[in-house]
């Protein structure tokens, strides 16, 4: 009898415990909660702690109130000058109004999907109005700010604050990059050929100027040498004439000795000459006696 009485009591206690546990929920720091009663939102909780709810009729939807990151996949975008780039953007957002978020987007997966679509559409629209040089200039910041303003204005009524939209990376497609690389390579090769040809032309000009300067310098040196040689010969003749005037007999004897050396040095072992030959006069009689000044005056 007692066992039969304890069973209903235990069942009641378990039901009471289950109801008590279903009546409370814990809200963590950085989260917010939306209380939905029988499908209709009835309240929002943003402060952390232990909270009460009506069991079985209230449903608590907890959302992360912190700053969240959405990184979009890379996609090709056509610019205003019909150039193609591969762009990737990212956005940071937070849920600031859980009620509007629930009414418009329902859950986080839907919010991420719609945010990615809106960011992609805004990016294509803004990038389609500029050319590639503008995208590589400081104007890029203005374009990204326009994308951020557009996305933020569209998601503000949905209870979502988009705090940041940025361009993560922007590259040329692989085939475009290869074509640009090939064009740059051919351009550099063309410039190298032009520089080599120009250098060869400059080398020829320098060589021709050097040859011309060499010819001029050699001709001037030869002319100066001939002038100097002529002046030396003239000076030697002058000195010789002065020496001859001082002692003509000695000079004549010296010239005879030079003639003997020149004539007899290369002659054979036997040289036939007549005894009265004028050529042998200096050899036979020696130098002539110098004349006195009185005789020279006479």
Image (cartoon, rainbow, N blue to C red):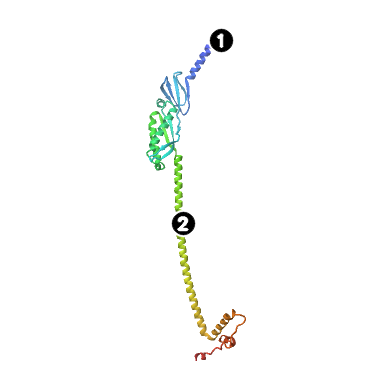
**Mark 2 closeness class: few <14, some 14–19, many ≥20 residues within 10 Å:** few
Say which of marks 1 and 2 sits in front. Answer: 2
What secondary structure is marked by label 1? Answer: helix
Residue pointed to by mark 2 = 200
Q: Out of 102 and 78, give the one closest to the viewer.
A: 78
Q: Position of residue 171 (x, y in %)?
A: 45, 40
Image height check: is 131 above or below 282? above
Residue at the (50%, 17%) spot, across then down: 18
Query: Which residue is tagged 1?
Result: 3
Which residue, as the protein is rendered here, is positioned at the far right? Answer: 269
Which of disc 2 and disc 1 is earlier in sequence?
1
- Tell me: residue 65, above or below residue 297: above
The residue under the point 49% across, 74% down is 229
Residue ID at (45%, 23%): 60
In the rendering, at what x and y percent does residue 11 appear? 52, 13
Q: Quadrant of the N terminus?
A: top right
CA–CA distance between discs 1 and 2? 116 Å
Number of numbered discs overlaid on the protein picture: 2
């Amino acid at each position: 009898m007692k066992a039969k009485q304890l069973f209903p009591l235990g069942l009641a206690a378990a039901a009471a415990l289950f109801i008590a546990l279903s009546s409370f929920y814990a809200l963590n720091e950085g989260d917010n909660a939306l209380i939905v009663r029988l499908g209709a939102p009835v309240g929002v909780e943003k402060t952390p702690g232990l909270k009460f709810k009506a069991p079985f009729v209230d449903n608590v939807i907890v959302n992360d109130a912190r700053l969240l990151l959405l990184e979009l996949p890379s996609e090709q975008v056509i610019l205003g000058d019909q150039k193609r780039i591969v762009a990737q953007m990212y956005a940071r957002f937070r849920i600031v109004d859980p009620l509007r978020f629930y009414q418009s987007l329902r859950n986080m997966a839907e919010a991420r999907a719609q945010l990615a679509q809106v960011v992609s559409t805004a990016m294509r629209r803004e990038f389609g109005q500029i050319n590639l040089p503008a995208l590589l200039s400081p104007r890029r910041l203005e374009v990204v700010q326009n994308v951020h303003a557009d996305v933020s204005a569209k998601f503000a009524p949905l209870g979502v604050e988009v705090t940041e939209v940025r361009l993560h990376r922007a590259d040329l497609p692989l085939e475009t990059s290869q074509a640009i690389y090939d064009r740059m390579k051919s351009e550099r090769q063309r410039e190298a050929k032009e520089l080599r040809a120009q250098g060869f032309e400059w080398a020829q000009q320098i060589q021709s100027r050097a040859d011309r300067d060499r010819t001029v310098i050699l001709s001037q040196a030869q002319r100066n040498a001939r002038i100097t040689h002529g002046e030396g010969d003239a000076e030697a003749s002058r000195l010789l004439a002065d020496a001859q005037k001082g002692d003509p007999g000695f000079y004549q004897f010296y010239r005879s000795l030079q003639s003997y050396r020149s004539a007899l040095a290369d002659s054979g072992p036997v040289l036939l000459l007549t005894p009265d030959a004028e050529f042998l006069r200096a050899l036979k009689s020696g130098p002539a006696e110098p004349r006195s000044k009185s005789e020279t005056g006479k």
